[in-house]
């Protein structure tokens, strides 16, 4: 769904801003199915390039393959190709201590069978606790649709720490996973982000992201001058998406019901027919008839 939303906005505007130079796409095969696709080197294990990281993470492929822990691949990828975020460009976020412990508790017993122990480079004691520091876990990563709003730019403020706050007045919320008030709302970014350019008094359509209850204007966000037809297009497109989703769900249910019915028919046809045993009288009668037909020769 997220890719489809992005495709819609790319259809409106083909030239999207490039990613910040500090981030780079994840290229490690094991980590390409993670909920993030951008990373920053060096990683938490001091590998300067992803090529070096690939050689190091390959030693754990067998452990991941036997599924000794459901969070092992997430933990390894968070260490070897840490997520590259706006607010932690120079200090990538580490995985939470609890994730490391779950991976270690599930896989270390198997490692010990082959005279190996949990590596010191992946020590859990060095990682932050969720309630006391910033860290990531599978439960904490949000993969919902972006926030889409119609707003008017009021002012742009720059702080001493290179953070830029764009204050917008929200006129309408077209799509959101959070409650966005129809008032002045800050969009947070920083000077290193090659984000869509905004000017005061612009009436715009904005696609941005929510992070810790804050609206973030990132490299992948899109901004378009507001036009009434954009709103109509978006709502018409959203309605089509919902209709497709309902149709797809109904087709899935029909296929399952057909498959179940077909299986029941096979089961019924496969049932062996029970042969009723003949009664003693009927058996004797049959034997007498056979004797009359085939008398014994003297």
Image: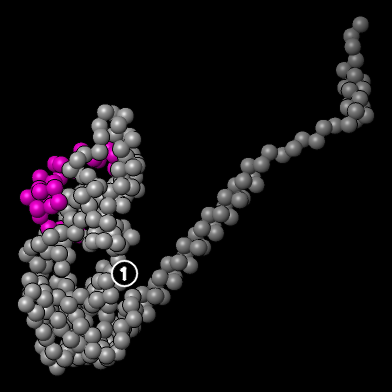
**Residue 152: x and y, percent?**
20, 91
Residue in the picture at 13% in, 89% down: 155
Residue 272 seen in the current view: yes
Q: Nearer the viewer, residue 10 or 104?
A: 104
Apparent side of residue 7 relative to residue 236 in the rendered image (left or right): left
**Residue 164: x and y, percent?**
11, 79
Residue in the picture at 24% in, 74% down: 209
Magenta-colored stretch includes residue 57: yes
Residue 149 occupies which quadrant of the picture?
bottom left
Which quarter of the figure is the C terminus placed in? top right
Q: Which residues are magenta?
A: 37-64
Q: Residue furthest front?
A: 132
Residue 36 occupies which quadrant of the picture?
bottom left
The image shows residue 189, relative to residue 248, as above or below, that is below
Apparent side of residue 191 relative to residue 206 in the rendered image (left or right): left
Local crowd at mark 1 within 10 Å, few (<14), some, or many (≥20)? few
Apparent side of residue 23 relative to residue 297 in the rendered image (left or right): left
**Residue 295: x and y, percent?**
90, 15
Residue in the picture at 10% in, 72% down: 193
Apparent side of residue 235 relative to residue 154 in the rendered image (left or right): right
Residue 12 seen in the current view: no
Which quarter of the figure is the N terminus placed in? bottom left
The image shows residue 145, relative to residue 72, as above or below, that is below
Magenta-colored stretch includes residue 77: no
Residue in the picture at 23% in, 77% down: 215
Q: Count every numbered label the image shows and give the total.
A: 1
- Residue located beneath label 1 in the image: 144
């Amino acid at each position: 769904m997220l890719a489809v939303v992005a495709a819609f906005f790319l259809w409106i505007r083909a030239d999207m801003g490039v990613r910040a130079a500090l981030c780079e796409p994840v290229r490690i095969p094991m980590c390409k199915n993670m909920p993030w696709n951008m990373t920053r080197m060096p990683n938490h294990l001091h590998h300067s390039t992803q090529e070096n990281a690939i050689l190091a993470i390959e030693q754990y492929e067998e452990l991941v393959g036997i599924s000794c822990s459901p969070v092992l691949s997430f933990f390894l990828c968070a260490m070897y190709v840490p997520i590259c975020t706006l607010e932690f460009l120079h200090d990538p976020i580490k995985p939470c201590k609890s994730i490391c412990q779950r991976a270690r508790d599930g896989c270390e017993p198997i490692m010990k069978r082959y005279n190996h122990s949990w590596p010191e480079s992946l020590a859990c004691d060095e990682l932050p606790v969720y309630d006391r520091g910033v860290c990531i876990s599978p439960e904490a990563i949000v993969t919902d649709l972006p926030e889409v709003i119609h707003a008017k730019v009021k002012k742009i403020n720059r702080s001493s720490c290179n953070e830029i706050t764009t204050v917008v007045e929200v006129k309408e919320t077209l799509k959101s996973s959070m409650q966005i008030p129809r008032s002045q709302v800050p969009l947070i970014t920083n000077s290193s982000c090659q984000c869509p350019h905004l000017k005061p008094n612009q009436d715009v359509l904005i696609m941005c992201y929510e992070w810790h209850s804050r609206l973030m204007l990132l490299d992948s966000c899109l901004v378009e001058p507001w036009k009434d037809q954009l709103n109509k297009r978006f709502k018409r497109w959203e309605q089509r998406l919902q209709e497709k989703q309902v149709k797809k769900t109904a087709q899935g249910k029909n296929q399952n019901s057909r498959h179940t019915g077909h299986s029941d028919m096979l089961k019924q046809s496969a049932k062996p027919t029970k042969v009723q045993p003949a009664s003693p009288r009927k058996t004797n009668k049959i034997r007498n008839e056979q004797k009359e037909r085939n008398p014994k020769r003297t």
